[in-house]
Image (cartoon, coloured by chain):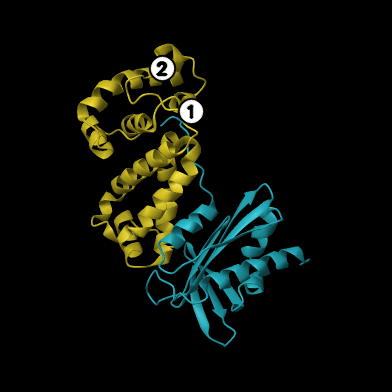
């Protein structure tokens, strides 16, 4: 194939919209955060130290490599524990446990960084969320993330 | 993350494993952007997004996971043509009857310039034949066009087109 054929652009935020479209009940919240992509993603991808600062129910997160993949263990506010499979890359974080899904994506835009979030309570074993407060929860997570980025580490 | 063969990955995704869906999406995206780009041009990002949304909303309807790429290609071509036609950005010429002249094509600075002078349907024919290597009858079936239309017009377009980028 010639390298000069036009190739469509496709950033991680579009990727998150697509994946959410394939999950029943999922909603995507989006917000521009006025900070460089590198700064935003350094915080989002530091799951052990930062996930709990914007995902309200995540406490005591530990991450470990398993083969080619990543697992995370988290404890919720009520003490419930969850083991997540994690797909983490530049601008992309997707986490799935038996009862939860968390997705965050980011892409640089002229005003800073466009960040998108989706997820919620999972119908166990299915690509479906329990449609209660899904949009609100994700919008709140993005507001928390923006506030976290605005304050010094 | 476990690396899976494509049919196995599709089946896991169809069963509702969102980690498999994420991996499948990462695998399909480069292919979809290569098909959508030359057909949808400025609408390529939207066409790729709409293609993949359609793919993942209808993933469970794919009965033969080994046929995944062919299925995705047909959706990508359809969505690219639809969005490019809807857009006012393209300035299409009459369908297939007024191909750019050899001189026009040869003077073009790059492939995008040449493509932009063609209708979305015509760009789709070029992509299916020259990029995807489909036979005329396969391209005609996918585009719902008579085989003769595709066959008779394609030769002239392709000759001109190749000269444009090899010049």
In the image, is A130 to the left or to the right of A40?
Answer: left
Q: In which quadrant of the rendered view does residue A92 lie?
A: bottom right
Provide the chain ID for the residue under circle 1: B
Q: Secondary structure at mark 2?
A: helix
- What is the x, y in percent for residue A117? 56, 64
Q: What residue is shown at x 53% (from left), y 73% (from top)? A: A72
- At x 32%, y 24%, the residue is B96
Q: Is residue B11 visible?
A: yes
Q: Which residue is mark 2?
A: B163
Q: Position of residue B36 (x, y in %)?
A: 42, 40
- Pointer 2 local density, CA inside 10 Å: few below 14, some 14–19, many at least 20: some
Q: Colour of chain B?
A: yellow
Relative to B103, is A32 above or below? below
Residue A95 left/right relative to A77: left
Under circle 1, the secondary element is helix
Q: Which chain is cyan?
A: A
What is the spatial separation of the Cα atoms under label 1 and label 2, in whole angstroms?
14 Å
Answer with left or right where residue B154 lies relative to residue A82.
Answer: left
The answer to whether residue A47 shows anywhere in this view is no
Image quarter hosting the N terminus of chain B:
bottom left
Q: Position of residue A29 (x, y in %)?
A: 56, 63
Q: In the rendered view, would you say B74 is above or below A120? A: above
Q: Which residue is mark 1?
A: B112
What is the residue that sits farthest to the top in this orientation?
B103
The image position of residue B164, as x and y in percent, is 44, 18
Residue extending farthest to the bottom is A78
Indicate which disc, 1 or 2, sits on the residue closer to the N terminus: 1
Disc on res. A67: none
């Amino acid at each position: 194939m010639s390298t000069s054929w036009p190739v469509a652009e496709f950033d991680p935020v579009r990727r998150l919209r697509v994946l959410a479209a394939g999950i029943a009940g999922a909603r995507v919240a989006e917000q521009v955060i006025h900070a460089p992509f590198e700064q935003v993603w350094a915080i989002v991808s530091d799951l052990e130290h930062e996930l709990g600062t914007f995902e309200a129910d995540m406490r005591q997160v530990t991450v470990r490599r398993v083969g080619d993949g990543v697992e995370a263990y988290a404890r919720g506010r009520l003490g419930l524990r969850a083991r997540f499979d994690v797909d983490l890359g530049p601008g992309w974080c997707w986490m799935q446990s038996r009862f939860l899904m968390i997705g965050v994506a980011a892409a640089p835009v002229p005003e800073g960084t466009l960040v998108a979030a989706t997820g919620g309570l999972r119908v166990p074993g299915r690509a479906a969320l329990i449609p209660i407060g899904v949009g609100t929860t994700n919008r709140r997570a993005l507001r928390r993330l923006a506030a976290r980025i605005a304050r010094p580490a | 993350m476990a690396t899976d063969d494509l049919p196995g990955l599709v089946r896991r995704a169809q069963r509702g494993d969102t980690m498999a869906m994420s991996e499948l999406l990462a695998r399909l995206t480069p292919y979809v952007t290569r098909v959508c780009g030359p057909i949808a041009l400025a609408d390529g990002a939207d066409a790729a997004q709409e293609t993949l949304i359609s793919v993942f909303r209808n993933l469970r309807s794919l009965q033969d996971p080994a046929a995944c790429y062919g299925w995705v290609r047909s959706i990508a071509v359809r969505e690219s043509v639809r969005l490019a036609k809807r857009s006012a950005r393209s300035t299409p010429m009459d369908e297939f009857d007024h191909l750019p002249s050899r001189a026009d094509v040869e003077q073009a600075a790059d492939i995008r310039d040449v493509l932009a002078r063609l209708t979305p349907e015509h760009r789709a024919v070029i992509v299916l034949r020259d990029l995807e290597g489909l036979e005329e009858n396969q391209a005609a079936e996918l585009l719902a066009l008579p085989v003769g239309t595709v066959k008779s017009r394609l030769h002239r377009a392709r000759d001109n087109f190749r000269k444009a980028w090899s010049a």
